Image: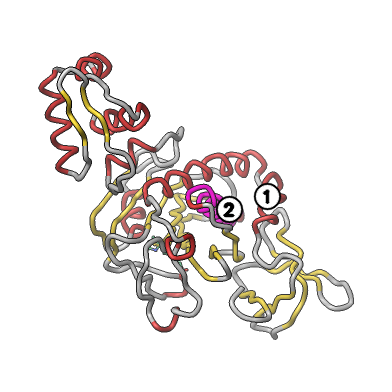
């Protein structure tokens, strides 16, 4: 009920009477009063005025379970959502939950991670009070070959979610990162459990750098955070909801098509360095070419000198801009 009260106060932007809250949620005045008291304890500034009711002070940043639930206007993605002040890793928690029967769409969010995991066995710096760390549980019934494309669908959702939330021009650095002004603001880590050609689950982990912070030395030159790039405060809850809502829509198109066909145009618009020169770090030998965007199975098309086009599969290689990271 707390999330519902919060959603109504946020939507109304004016006083809502205690009577209306009681009638809407079918509870007593005492129950409403108690819920308001608990929300205040969680950090919400709620004004209570006799004969008028309750009003939420606007422009405040509360990050937690009720904030997320009250904003999550999706059908299945982000439902339910579980918020933790601290976790080892949201991916790890999501895997445990998925094995214990959590349903598709379950979202695990943490304010901080003590053992945040990056790709290629790296760690993911996850301090408290500043960034976004979440993992979405999916239980798809499509072929195993399609699973790697889920990261691309999420990449598109994160880039658009960032644009919508803070007005920054975010781009996808195929296949796993999101960049703003050429610097990495987000990394993604998908993990899955399969048996022969059956997918038990995919957990899609996303880490977004939001608040100003000191990055570890090895990434300081290539990493950035949203607040520094846009020069404004960013609501982490609003950002997560915008990403999850966008993902929900795109994932449905992807599932319907069984490929990225329906998302290709948009993805390639959002792709960093499209039609620019790239270096392909192939274990068989590095080469250069022009990035021509992805195809419907998520490979990056790289046009080599002489016009031949290679379809580069994400698992095998890394791609860099000729002048650096993007
Ligand atoms: C990368 O190396 O770029 C991928 C980073 C992925 C980090 C996110 S944060 C939320 C989720 N939980 C983890 O432990 N890792 C992912």
Is 157 within the magenta?
Answer: yes
Give residue 42's position: percent from left, percent from top.
18, 44
* Viewer can see residue 101: no
Majority secondary structure of magenta residues: helix
Q: Where in the figure is residue 103, as x and y percent of width and height?
A: 39, 40
Q: Residue 232: give x, y in percent of width and height.
A: 42, 57
Q: Looking at this view, is 63 or 309 the one in front?
A: 63
Disc 1 packing (10 Å; few <14; some 14–19; many ≥20): few
Residue found at x 65% / y 56%: 270
Ligand 1 quadrant assignment = bottom left
Residue where numbered disc 1 is placed: 266
| Residue drawn at x 81%, y 75% as measured from the top left | 304
Q: Is residue 280 magenta?
A: no
How far is the residue under mark 2 from the one under mark 1? 8 Å
Dot 2 lies on which element? helix
Q: Are marks 2 and 1 in contact (CB under 8 Å)?
A: yes
Which residue was labeled with disc 2? 156
Query: Residue 168 is drawn in which quadrant?
Result: bottom right
* Residue at the spot 37% in from the left edge and 73% down from the top edge: 123
Residue, far bottom: 285
The residue range painted magenta reads: 146-165
Is disc 2 surrounded by few (<14), some (14 to 19) or many (20+) residues within 10 Å? many
């Amino acid at each position: 009920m707390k999330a519902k009260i919060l959603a109504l106060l946020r939507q109304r932007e004016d006083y809502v009477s205690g009577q209306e809250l009681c009638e809407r949620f079918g509870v007593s005045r005492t129950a409403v009063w108690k819920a308001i008291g608990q929300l205040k304890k969680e950090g919400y500034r709620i004004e209570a005025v006799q004969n008028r009711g309750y009003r939420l002070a606007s422009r405040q940043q509360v990050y937690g379970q009720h904030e997320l639930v009250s904003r999550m206007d999706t059908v299945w993605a982000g439902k339910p959502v579980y918020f933790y002040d601290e976790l080892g890793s949201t991916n790890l928690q999501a895997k445990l939950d998925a094995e214990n029967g959590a349903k598709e769409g379950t979202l695990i969010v943490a304010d901080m991670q003590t053992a945040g995991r990056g790709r290629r066995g790296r760690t993911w710096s996850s301090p408290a009070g500043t960034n976004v760390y979440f993992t979405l549980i999916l239980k798809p019934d499509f072929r195993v070959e399609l699973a790697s494309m889920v990261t691309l669908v999420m990449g598109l959702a994160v880039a658009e979610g960032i644009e919508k939330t803070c007005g920054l021009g975010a781009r996808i650095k195929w296949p796993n990162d999101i960049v703003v002004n050429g610097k990495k603001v987000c990394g993604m880590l998908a993990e899955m459990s399969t048996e022969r050609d059956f997918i038990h689950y995919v957990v899609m982990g996303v880490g977004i750098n939001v608040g100003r912070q000191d990055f570890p030395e090895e990434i300081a030159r290539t990493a950035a955070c949203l607040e520094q790039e846009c020069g404004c405060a960013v609501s982490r809850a609003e950002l997560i909801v915008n990403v999850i809502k966008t993902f929900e829509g795109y994932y449905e198109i992807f599932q319907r098509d069984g490929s990225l066909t329906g998302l290709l145009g948009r993805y390639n618009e959002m792709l960093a360095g499209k039609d620019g020169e790239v270096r392909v770090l192939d274990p068989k030998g590095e080469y250069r070419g022009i990035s021509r965007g992805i195809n419907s199975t998520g490979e990056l098309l790289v046009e080599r000198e002489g016009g031949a086009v290679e379809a580069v599969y994400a698992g095998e290689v890394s791609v860099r801009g000729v002048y650096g990271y993007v």
